[in-house]
Amino acid sequence: MADADESPIVLPDDPSFGPEVQVDYPGYRSTRWRAPKRPLVTLPEELHALDGPVFGAESFGALDHDLTRQHEGEPLGERIIVHGRVLDEDGRAIRGALVEVWQANAGGRYKHVVDQHPAPLDPNFSGAGRCLTDDQGRYRFVTIMPGSYPWGNHENAWRPAHIHFSVFGRQFTQRLVTQMYFPGDPLFAYDPIINSVRDPQSRALLISRFDLDATQPEWALGYEWDVVLGRGARGTTPLEDAP
Amino acid sequence: MTLGRTPSQTVGPFFSIGLSRRPENELVPGPAPEAVRLTGRLLDGAGMPIGDGLVEVSDPPARRWGRTGTDAEGRFSFVVAKPVAAAGQAPHLELFVFARGLLRHQLTRIYFPDEPEANAGDPLLSSLGEVDRETLVAVDDEGVLRFDIHMQGERATVFFAH
């Protein structure tokens, strides 16, 4: 998605930026005409008491969580297990949360008509999965390690390997769309999307942890990544969900 | 214990792989007597269509929710029903916008054009200036609700902190 030819702007890390993402982040060119320029208007607190949508398990296929078994053959690439919990800021599990993921294949190519990166498509990999969290807020996907890919934001721009996550919490304002990264990626320092989160501690929350306990011998590496959603209105999360 | 909140990241240009695998744009069934078609365009600050956006519309108290991607002209389309208004408020739907170039999703509201009295008495709408207020009220286009979303510019849609 080349939409600018200027060099990237990387802002300095500064704790005064706080944990929130910088919505109008100049290093990410596509924000220029799309990010709202005016201050956001504050809504009454009642908004935070609204429930989010509820998704039932009945529409799920048995293999929706396993991106390696959605075709006749196995996809190419390094098999991985990605698991974790969906929690609120108080550490309480959010059960029944819909978690949806999508990603590039091992070569760094999305199965999407707009993606013209000259890396091969994999006929055995669609790159999409979903599941509901269990009573402990746990989710689990089996997939393959996504490849890095160029994206035209600036000269020689490459995205660190990532998996896109969409999560619905219990409350309307707990909605989250984000990206999960892998530890030690050399591209972090050059990527304006992960660096749009200016606080280094907050940025680290986007990076999964290698998990030897979840690694299955002779089969697949494990990565653990918890998703923490906002609290919403105080006191509206039922107490029986305490860990 | 307070855990750090997971930051938002852009939905990117390829979300339809994971989030548009099936039609989910009917908050109520099309044939329902209260069903109304809601359409609009998602436009950037240069007035160009955002053809890779994702729009979610919901009526949380009624547990109604839907989503759809935008097409090359930035168009989106839903089947909705007018919500029951909370006391002292005008009926409205909540709308989230996701897109490449949006590092976090944006929240706005759709109010109804056939509710002038309720809209005039709505505390949120009446707290806004006239131009801003108009960005939140759908237009009646021969029975279809039209709601265009301008991310920036003189007619920029009002977005809310969430």
Image: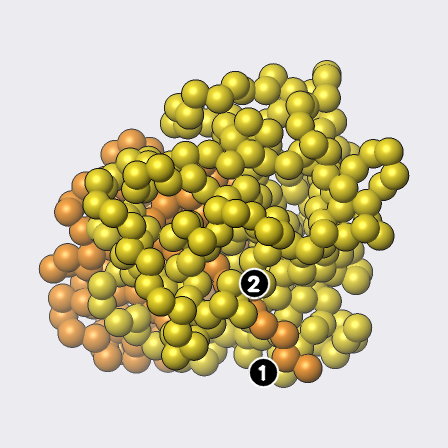
Drawing shade for chain A:
yellow
- Foreground: disc 1 or disc 2: 2
Circle 2 crowding by C-alpha within 10 Å: few under 14, some 14–19, many from 20: some
Residue located at (67% from left, 60% from top): A226
| Circles 1, 2 touching at the beta carbon (< 8 Å) | no
Which residue, given by chain and number where applicable, does mark 2 sit on? A204
Task: Check the image and tell me how it is coloured.
Answer: by chain
| Picture quarter with the C terminus of chain A | bottom right
Residue located at (69% from left, 36% from top): A143
Q: Which mark is residue A234?
A: 1
Identify residue type, mark 2.
Ala
Residue located at (37% from left, 40% from top): A157
Q: Chain of mark 2?
A: A
Judged left or right of residue A34, residue A46 is: right
A222, above or below A194, in the image: above
A196, above or below A152, in the image: below
Which badge, 1 or 2, is on the more N-terminal residue? 2
Drawing shade for chain B:
orange
Judged left or right of residue B155, residue A243 is: right
Using the rendered image of the protein, determine whether residue B21 is visible from the camera's viewpoint. Answer: no
Spatial CA span between label 1 and label 2: 26 Å
Q: Position of residue A236 (x, y in %)?
A: 62, 78
